[in-house]
Image (cartoon, rainbow, N blue to C red):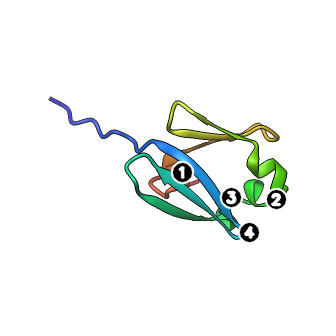
């Protein structure tokens, strides 16, 4: 029997100016993501940062860019 780890679900995100992003998870945990690791997100305008969607609870996308970020990348479980 193989143990399958369940990925944490993204509940919401918010920003700390242009330096960080809070990733709020459904399990009530919050991670601070340094945006220097994700320059494509860091370079979005304030309005573009508000225009995002959470896909299948474990992926994040912004409407103005063609990139999808997994919760694993965002919270540092895998290399971005």
CA gap, disc 1 and disc 3: 10 Å
Which residue ends up furthest to the left in the rendered image? 1
Q: Is residue 73 visible?
A: yes
Considering only order in the chain, which callout, 2 or 1, is on the residue closer to the N terminus? Answer: 2
> CB of mark 2 within 8 Å of CB of mark 4?
no
Considering only order in the chain, which callout, 3 or 4, is on the residue closer to the N terminus? Answer: 4
- 10 Å crowding of disc 4: few (<14), some (14-19), many (20+): few
CA gap, disc 2 and disc 3: 9 Å
Residues 57 and 79: in front is 57
Quarter of the image for residue 20 reads: bottom right
Label 1 sits on residue: 73
Residues 12 and 21: in front is 12
Considering only order in the chain, which callout, 3 or 2, is on the residue closer to the N terminus? Answer: 3
Label 4 sits on residue: 17
Label 3 sits on residue: 38
CA gap, disc 4 and disc 3: 14 Å
CA gap, disc 1 and disc 2: 18 Å
Considering only order in the chain, which callout, 3 or 1, is on the residue closer to the N terminus? Answer: 3
- 10 Å crowding of disc 1: few (<14), some (14-19), many (20+): some
> CB of mark 4 within 8 Å of CB of mark 1?
no
Considering only order in the chain, which callout, 1 or 4, is on the residue closer to the N terminus? Answer: 4
Badge 4 marks a residue whose secondary structure is loop
Side of 80 relative to 35 (left or right):
left
């Amino acid at each position: 029997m193989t143990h399958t780890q369940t990925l944490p679900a993204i509940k919401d995100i918010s920003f700390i100016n242009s330096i960080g992003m809070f990733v709020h998870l459904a399990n009530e945990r919050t991670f601070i993501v340094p945006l220097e690791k994700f320059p494509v997100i860091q370079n979005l305008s304030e309005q573009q940062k508000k225009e995002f969607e959470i896909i299948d609870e474990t992926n994040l996308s912004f409407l103005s860019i063609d990139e999808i970020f997994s919760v694993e990348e965002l919270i540092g479980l895998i290399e971005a």
